[in-house]
Amino acid sequence: METLQITQLSRTELESIIQNNVTSAVSKVLGSIPQNDDLLSFKDAAKFLNLAAPTLYRHTSKGTIPFLKRGKKILFSREKLIKWMHGE
């Protein structure tokens, strides 16, 4: 890990550095979350993939299928499922 020593930064400079880092981090996070139109529930994903619920659960627990977890809900990106089906 790189050590950065900060000395004699003005309040404006420090605020600018923090703002740039926060903006960058938020952009990365938001870019990785699909839009709600693209999200499928567990039940809908199983239907979309023509898989039994236990089979889909096994894939999620082993991490062999892309999914998101929001609280206790498991959600799937339709686009990522299509890529997963094609082996991408």
Image (cartoon, helix red, strand yellow):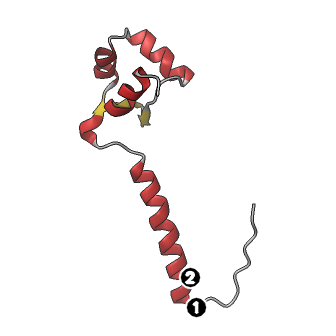
Q: Residue 49 vs residue 68: left or right?
A: left
What residue appears at the point 46 percent right and 55 percent down from the top-left corner? 28
The amino acid type, in three-letter code, at marker 2 is Leu
Quadrant in the picture for the N terminus: bottom right
What residue appears at the point 37 percent right and 31 percent down from the top-left corner? 75
The residue that disc 1 covers is 10
Residue at the left extreme, as displayed: 37
Q: Residue 47 vs residue 5: left or right?
A: left
| Spatial separation of the CA atoms under disc 1 and disc 2 | 6 Å
Mark 2 nearby-residue class (10 Å; few <14, some 14–19, many ≥20) = few
Where residue 15 sits in the image (x, y, percent)? 51, 81
Position of residue 54 relative to residue 34, above or below, is above
- Are discs 1 and 2 less than 8 Å apart at CB? yes
Count every numbered label the image shows and give the total: 2
Rendering quarter of residue 39: top left
Kindly identify which numbered label has been placed on residue 25: none
The residue that disc 2 covers is 14
Where residue 29 sits in the image (x, y, percent)? 45, 52
The amino acid type, in three-letter code, at marker 1 is Ser
Position of residue 41 relative to residue 59, above or below, is below
What residue appears at the point 42 percent right and 46 percent down from the top-left corner? 32
Mark 1 nearby-residue class (10 Å; few <14, some 14–19, many ≥20) = few
Position of residue 33 relative to residue 12, above or below, is above
